Image (spheres, helix red, strand yellow):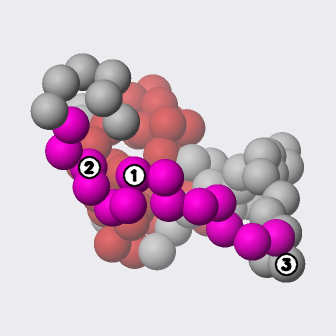
């Protein structure tokens, strides 16, 4: 954990799990990537996430909900019956 903290602090806290793990490998410290991920999560360390989040749905709360055409009966006796 001390090595992870040192690497993360040295590199202007932007390193994510992958880059910290690769730096540990370069320094000869053999550790699993999932271990680095778990330790960073425990320590509250996160890398910078680039880009914007994609907003795919813009819902309108003023619009009415669609009608329930199956009357909440989700069992069909045969395929394509509902």
Q: Position of residue 13 (x, y in %)?
A: 68, 61
Q: Position of residue 2 (x, y in %)?
A: 36, 66
Q: Nearer the viewer, mark 3 or mark 2?
A: 2
Identified at 36% across, 36% down, the residue is 82
Give the secondary structure at mark 1: loop
Instruction: Identify the residue under disc 1.
Output: 70
Compute the Cα span from label 2 to label 1.
Answer: 7 Å
Q: Which mark is residue 62?
A: 3
Instruction: Identify the residue under disc 2.
Output: 74
Quadrant for residue 79, please give it.
Answer: top left
Up/down of 9 relative to 17, above or below: below
Up/down of 39 relative to 23, above or below: below
12 lies left or right of 34: right
> How busy is the neighbourhood of tag 2: few (under 14 within 10 Å), some, or many (20 plus)?
few
Compute the Cα span from label 3 to label 2.
Answer: 27 Å
Q: Position of residue 50 (x, y in %)?
A: 79, 46
Verify CB contact (< 8 Å) between mark 3 and mark 2: no
Does residue 27 appear in this view? no
53 lies left or right of 10: right
Identified at 39% across, 52% down, the residue is 70
Identified at 79% across, 64% down, the residue is 59
């Amino acid at each position: 954990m001390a090595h992870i903290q040192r690497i993360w602090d040295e590199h202007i806290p932007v390193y994510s799990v992958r880059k910290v793990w690769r730096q540990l490998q370069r320094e000869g410290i053999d550790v699993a990537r999932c271990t680095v991920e778990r330790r960073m999560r425990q320590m509250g360390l996160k890398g910078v996430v680039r880009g914007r989040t994609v907003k795919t749905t813009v819902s309108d709360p003023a619009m009415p909900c669609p009608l329930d055409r199956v009357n909440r009966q989700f069992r069909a006796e045969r395929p394509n019956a509902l």
